[in-house]
Amino acid sequence: MPGITLPPATASQTAQALASKQTDPAISTEEAQSPVPNSDDEPQPSPSTGITTPPSQPTSPPQMLLDDAILTRHSTRQFLPTPVPQALISRALSLASHSPSDTNTQAWRLFIVSGEALARLKSSLLSAAATREPDIAPFPPAFQSYRSALGKAVFGDGFGVAHDDAEGRKAATMRNYAFYGAPVAVIVCMSAALEGRAAFSVGMYVQTLLLALTEVGVGSCVEVSVAGFADVVKREVGIGEDLRVLVGVAVGFEDEGARVNAIRSEREEVGRTTVWVE
């Protein structure tokens, strides 16, 4: 059974640079921009969304080796409220669009939610989760040990909730539906006309997206639980019945002081998951 390790919570150099240099960070509508607005051209936020449009200042984003991105990526379960520049998200989306897919269907359809729209979505999800169970298939008993190990680490070591504290565990679970305080949520969908196997292609896309976000110091957490309230998500975000909600992804700058973000789940050895046939 996989265990959980708790290495020291060290900040990525990229995230530190972005977070410390952005005196007024915000989601920008420019395709490319410097993370540091010029003090002489201070962007003015929209009174309704808080989204700013700083002057375009193209820069070369920091680059990370693929090995580093894969090993650095982890589930972030507590975010800073600092808005994420749209340029960083757009770049990650552009890179992810090169992901492979079955017969090149590129079946992924995304909705990027922030500002007041995200506040409404969080509120509605929290209300729904407080009154009914999510519509998610039962977890297979054969894999329950993995879930239990992760739950013990996240709830106990991460959030400091005792195993017998039912109310505390419920409160910790509800953090899912607030996207762990992230300023951006990505709702990942695919066509309802496609069969379940198409979700494999969307999964490859999501992994590429996560790695691209990791490269620029942006944290993420994939949340299957959000799809358990697909009716709420569709209503609040404006998603048609022609699409199927697969997962939500919380996106933002990681709170590096939060103990829960230091948790790293161990992986099975390749020999336990792979058969070589010659």
Image (cartoon, rainbow, N blue to C red):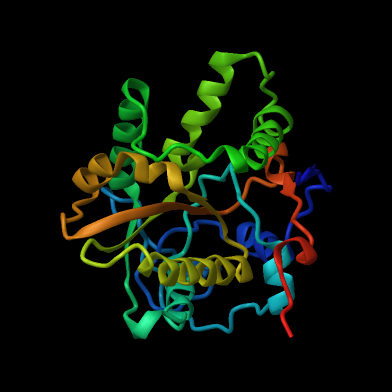
Residue 195: percent from left, percent from top: 30, 65
Residue extending farthest to the right is: 8
Placement of 237 over or under 138, stated as above or below = below
Q: Work out whether 99 lies above or below 35.
A: below
Q: Residue at x 49, y 71 (%)?
A: 204
Residue 211 in the figure: left or right of residue 243: right
Residue drawn where x is 70% and y is 37% of the image: 149
Residue in the foreground of this view, choosing between 105 and 89: 105
**Residue at horizontal 68 percent and vertical 44 percent from the top:** 261
Q: How many marks?
A: 0
Q: Position of residue 258 (x, y in %)?
A: 69, 39
Q: Residue at x 36, y 34 (%)?
A: 134
Instruction: Please give left or right for residue 251 compared with residue 110 in the image.
Output: right
Q: Quadrant of residue 274?
A: bottom right
Rendered location of residue 59, percent (x, y): 55, 83
Left or right: 110 in relation to 170: left
Q: Quadrant of the N terminus?
A: top right
